[in-house]
Image: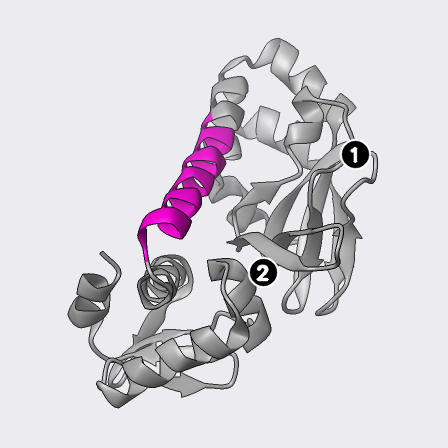
Amino acid sequence: MDIEVLRRAPLFATLDDDAFRLLTDELTEVDLSRGASVFREGDQGDQLYFIVSGKVKLGRTSPDGRESLLAILGPGELFGEMALFDPSPRTATATAVSETRLAGLKNESLNALLRTRPEVSAQLLQALARRLRRTNDSLSDLVFSDVPGRVAKALLDLADRFGRPATDGVLVAHELTQEELAQLVGASRETVNKALAEFVQRGWLRLEARAVVILDMQRLRQRSR
């Protein structure tokens, strides 16, 4: 397990070495292949997870079978933390979108730490607040933004978290299929493909397999507003 990734995670960053070592001794490794789920909507939850490597999508399914993506998470981020505060069934399905390694932490182990290190509670609340803020932004975009604007904003968010320099721009290996990208922005695959084709025609980006290269960050940012 890459301990350094966890050490940089906000939840662990405030711990001294002894507390960090005690907590990581309680972690269990979980390896997932693409498409494998660590838990499903409706399951009972008794632990949270940290992403050591790879990416995880959080999604929900409507009664008629339609799917929507709530978030795409990567190394250093955590999920499943709501089960710590609310013992209700899981509200989303967590699925790997690439080869992924997780570190699982039982709620009882984290509760023991919280009793002696209350500052960790503040980090957990900040993580929940970030997730809530992102959800609020997504709801606002669904009301006020058109599909191309939502696609542009989603690509910029993925670039901020997963992008790396390429010879002619920023490579964003998002690992998502076109259907998953459409679910992320709340639109049909056909409409999202049309928006991507327009961005390509304008010279703002180049499409690659489950990735894009952003060629004109400024124009894409203007279109996201």
Counting from the top left corner in percent of width and height, residue 41 is at 76, 45
Disc 2 and disc 1 in contact, CB within 8 angstroms:
no
Quarter-wise, where is residue 204 in the image? bottom left
Instruction: Name the residue type under label 1.
Output: Gly
- Could you classify mark 1 by the number of other residues whose Cα lies within 10 Å: few (under 14), some (14-19), or many (20 or more)? many
For residue 201, above or below residue 52:
below
Q: Using the image as rendered, state which of residue 164 and residue 94 is in the foreground.
A: 94
User: Image check: 65 left or right of 127?
Assistant: right
Which SS class for mark 2?
loop
Q: Using the image as rendered, state which of residue 122 and residue 141 is in the foreground.
A: 141
**Which residue is most to the right?**
44
Which range of residues does the magenta coloring cover?
A: 126-145
- Could you classify mark 2 by the number of other residues whose Cα lies within 10 Å: few (under 14), some (14-19), or many (20 or more)? many
Q: Nearer the viewer, mark 2 or mark 1?
A: 1
Label 2 to label 1: alpha-carbon separation: 20 Å
Which SS class for mark 1?
loop
Residue visible at 47% across and 34% down in the picture: 132
Counting from the top left corner in percent of width and height, residue 117 is at 56, 14
Q: Earlier in the sequence, mark 2 or mark 1?
A: 1
Residue 16 in view of the camera: no
Residue visible at 34% across and 80% down in the picture: 213
Residue 84 in view of the camera: yes
The number of numbered badges drawn on the structure is 2
The answer to whether residue 29 is magenta is no
Counting from the top left corner in percent of width and height, residue 23 is at 67, 30
Type of secondary structure dominating the magenta stretch? helix
For residue 87, above or below residue 7:
above
Q: Which residue is mark 1?
A: 45
Counting from the top left corner in percent of width and height, residue 1 is at 66, 53
Q: Quadrant of the C terminus?
A: bottom left
Q: Which residue is mark 2?
A: 55
Residue visible at 75% across and 56% down in the picture: 64
